[in-house]
Amino acid sequence: MQELLPDGEWLMAAIMGMAEEQVEEVCKKVKSGFVVPANFNTTGQIVISGEKQAVEEAEIIAKELGAKKVRVLKTAGPFHTAKLEEASKAFAKELETVAIHDFAIDVVKNLDGTVYTKNDNVKEILAKHIISPVRFSKSLETMLQMGVDTFIEIGPR
């Protein structure tokens, strides 16, 4: 994704203390450029992604509408938005060389919070992840409904 970023100044910011619908409304109110919700992490924590000026405007609007906190993230691109269409296409092409086998366990898609089925086109779904919002909160809900009671977060460090 990093190699295929579109030109421009991009920014992401986490908005805390607002519902999904409120953050979507904040983004719609922005007049200075492109900004959309990109990561629905948990209840009350949603990340927006877009043009720097638009994200900064969204930060002001969110605070005016009651956000508890807005935190700019250290990122360099409009991740999980339609602005990364070229990266999505490149990833889809790369995935053509990869063999995908049936899953031995249930795997939940962050694309929509549902479990993969045998009929899903896994490669297509993975490529869509680049240009689609991450629905992690829905994934968590699905796993809780499935009886998962232990979560282990593994990060880059």
Image (cartoon, helix red, strand yellow):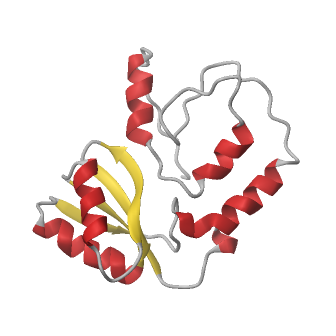
Pinpoint residue 66: horizontal percent, then vertical percent: 11, 60
For image coordinates 62% across by 75% down, the residue present is: 5
Query: Going by the image, does 127 lie left or right of 49?
Result: right
Tell how many labels.
Answer: 0
Q: Is residue 156 placed above or below 125 in the rendered structure?
A: below
For image coordinates 56% across by 70% down, the residue present is: 83
Q: Quadrant of residue 72?
A: bottom left
Pinpoint residue 76: horizontal percent, then vertical percent: 52, 74
Pinpoint residue 88: horizontal percent, then vertical percent: 68, 59
Query: Going by the image, does 18 lie left or right of 4?
Result: left
Q: Quadrant of residue 49?
A: bottom left
Q: Quadrant of the N terminus?
A: bottom right
Q: Is residue 11 placed above or below 131 in the rendered structure?
A: below
Q: Nearer the viewer, residue 73 or 17?
A: 17
Q: Is residue 109 placed above or below 52 in the rendered structure?
A: above
Q: Residue furthest right?
A: 97
Pinpoint residue 95: horizontal percent, then vertical percent: 80, 49
For image coordinates 19% across by 71% down, the residue present is: 61
